[in-house]
Image (spheres, grey):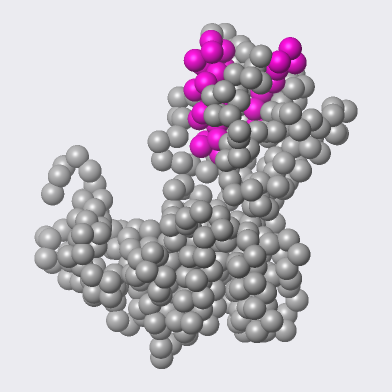
Amino acid sequence: MSTKVPVYESIKQELKSKIEDGSLPEGARIPSEIELAKQLGVNRSQTRQALRELEVEGYLVRKQGSGSYVAPMAGQMSAVKVAGARAIAIVIPKIIAGHSYNVVQGFMHRASQESLQTLTYNLNLPQPHAPSEPRFLRSVIDSGVTGLVLWIGNDNEQTRALVQELIDKRFPFVLIDRCLPGLDANYVVSDNRALGRSLTQKLLQRGHERICFVGIECPNASSIQDRVEGYRQALEEAGLTYDEQYIINLTSLEQSPQETVGTMMAFCNRPTAFVCVHVDAARPIYNELTKLGYRIGSNFELAIVDDEYPGGMPHVPMIRRPQRGFEIGVQSAEVLLARMNNPEMPTQRLYIEPGAFIESKNEMADAERG
């Protein structure tokens, strides 16, 4: 084993490589954490961590009383068949941030307290209108699960039709991260209006009046729409006018992000601050502004929804506020279990308050002095 990475990470990467190259095919049983520990001569806690992370990332599925098995690839549009036991599943897009990981961990934490088989499906989503997401979701439903938590990637006609079918059949399910407005579905989401409003208020308190909102997401995501609405509310409460020219959607630009930023900063009333939906939206803005000679703290400031992205911007001073992913996961499992026990219960719509602000005063001060 390499000494440059934790032991569990080496075990995880070795198993992942075998799954990806086909050495461990779909449906293959993985040795238990005890068996792996004996084979590799390591502590059981290391193999437990490796198997748990592979399960969270969608490479493995755990069957209660049987063990862990290689999960189906999302591109094959099939789900592991379950039989003989009550089973629930969580389906989320490919994990790219700590927030996603925390949601799954919270769901698994609550679900583990029940006598249920639990499965995690990690779906790598294609273009917004491709049919693979609803097809895969249907395969999960047909697999025999008795309850489902869904992180919908694309709000489109096909997906809505499937969700409406679940509602009509009274199939127990809960939406997470974003809802589907107009459908009478249970959901557990961040209070996204509070996120957009509070980040904008922070910048207003620092003296900014020309604040730009930057998004990068599927165009119909309710989470982004709500953050924009919170941004609008904060401006109007401060007596400022909401202006569409200060809204940047990086997924639907006619120009490149670099050209868009350059054009915006050429305005005589150019923005002095940016509210970004996450670090993937902040990064191109920051990079282009610094190339143009602007300095954070002196010429502009950033406020972002901090979802703990790998390879983020740790040394860039920003105002940050995180989502409480673990709590979203716990509450989604709680609502799902309640729905399974009582199909007649009223529709549940839960908004989870964001976490505390993360703001390094020393960094901000240093940036301003710079």
Q: Is residue 361 above or below residue 226?
A: above
Q: Is residue 370 left or right of residue 167?
A: left
- In terms of depth relative to the viewer, which is nearer, 185 or 56? 185
How far across and down, in percent of the image, does residue 354 sit? 64, 47
* Residue found farthest to the front: 254
Q: Is residue 273 left or right of residue 121?
A: right
* Residue found farthest to the bottom: 84
Q: Measuring 61% from the left and 11% from the top, which residue is drawn there?
A: 298
Q: Measuring 51% from the left and 78% from the top, which residue is drawn there?
A: 141
Confirm whether the magenta stretch covers residue 184.
no
Question: Is any part of residue 73 visible from this angle?
Answer: yes
Question: Is any part of residue 318 visible from this angle?
Answer: no
Res. 228 image quadrant: top right
Q: Measuring 45% from the left and 29% from the top, which residue is drawn there?
A: 314
Confirm whether the magenta stretch covers residue 285.
yes
What span is colored magenta in the figure?
267-296
Q: Measuring 42% from the left and 79% from the top, which residue is drawn there?
A: 117
Res. 340 image quadrant: bottom right
How far across and down, in percent of the image, does residue 200 sit? 72, 32
How far across and down, in percent of the image, does residue 343 sit? 67, 84
Q: Quadrant of the C terminus?
A: top right
How far across and down, in percent of the image, does residue 216 sit? 58, 41
Q: Is residue 320 left or right of residue 105?
A: right
